[in-house]
Image (tube, rainbow, N blue to C red):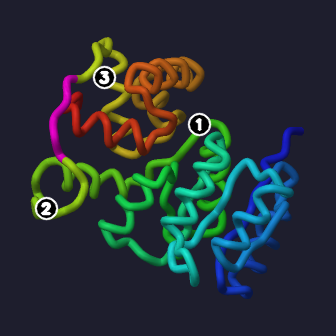
Amino acid sequence: MTQVRIMLVDDHALFREGLALLLKGRPNLQVVAEAATGEEALVQLESAHPDLVLLDLNLPGIGGVETCRLLKERAPELRVVILTMSDDLESIFEAVRAGACGYLLKDIASQNLLEAIDQIDHEGGILEPFLARRLLAEFSGLRSASRSVESVVTPGPALSPRETEILQKVVDGLSNKEIADRLCISKYTVGNHINNIFRKLGVNDRTQAAVAAIKMRLV
């Protein structure tokens, strides 16, 4: 069984230890490092070689967003998922711009967190419905134009009708299995379509695909 190597970055030791215990209960998950600061995480990265980082935004020192950016700079294939209390829109977009492939709130149920990690491992990222709604609101002009995320429309690639249909469901926050159930096709077919969509959009994960789709008005 292939294990997902996970690093936990959170300055609250009790939360970090509890999360480690939860993850260690799954045979396919291995906690290879823990860090209380971004600086510690960058040091641990060199020796632990994680596949996935669960990262809090509110860190002392360089902070969560900058930690995410530096981690991705040093290990571009690393998957960084924000796990935090903040659902502030600006924090969400800063994390996405820094390279996060998902954004989860700490009030998530333990089973849902485990399922989210499985989805990230198999599908390369996760777009929670609450984040999908905020993305739609931002790029639909329903929020203040003073936000720092650009809303410039750029020409989009040519997607097939099926790819456009699947991309819309990615923007809605559906997983591959949920998309497959809605469209009565296999999840493997969905995965192939999503890989093609990522390639055409020039992105690496679902969150980036959703942002690109809305900015290019593909959905």
Q: Nearer the viewer, mark 1 or mark 2?
A: 2
Q: Nearest the camera: 202 or 16? A: 202
7 vs 91, left or right, is right
Circle 1 is placed at which residue position? Answer: 123
40 vs 160, left or right, is right
Magenta stretch, residue numbers: 151-155
Q: Amino acid at mark 1?
A: Glu
Q: Amino acid at mark 3?
A: Thr
Query: In the image, is residue 11 above or below residue 78?
Result: below
**Tag 1's secondary structure?**
helix
Q: Nearest the camera: 139 or 162? A: 139
Q: Residues within 10 Å of mark 2 (few under 14, many from 20)?
A: few
Sequence order check: which comes first, mark 1 or mark 3? 1
| Disc 1 and disc 3 in contact, CB within 8 angstroms | no
Q: Residues within 10 Å of mark 1 (few under 14, many from 20)?
A: some
| Disc 1 and disc 2 in contact, CB within 8 angstroms | no
Q: Whole-percent x and y of residue 55?
A: 60, 66
Residue at x 76% of width, y 65% of height: 43
152 vs 42, left or right, is left
Q: Whole-percent x and y of residue 167?
A: 35, 30
**Tag 3's secondary structure?**
helix
Residue at x 30% of width, y 22% of height: 164
Circle 3 is placed at which residue position? Answer: 164
Circle 2 is placed at which residue position? Answer: 143
Q: Label for residue 97?
A: none
Image quarter (top left, top right, bottom left or bottom right) of the C terminus: top left
What is the chief secondary structure element of the magenta stretch? loop
Q: CA distance from mark 3 to mark 2?
A: 25 Å
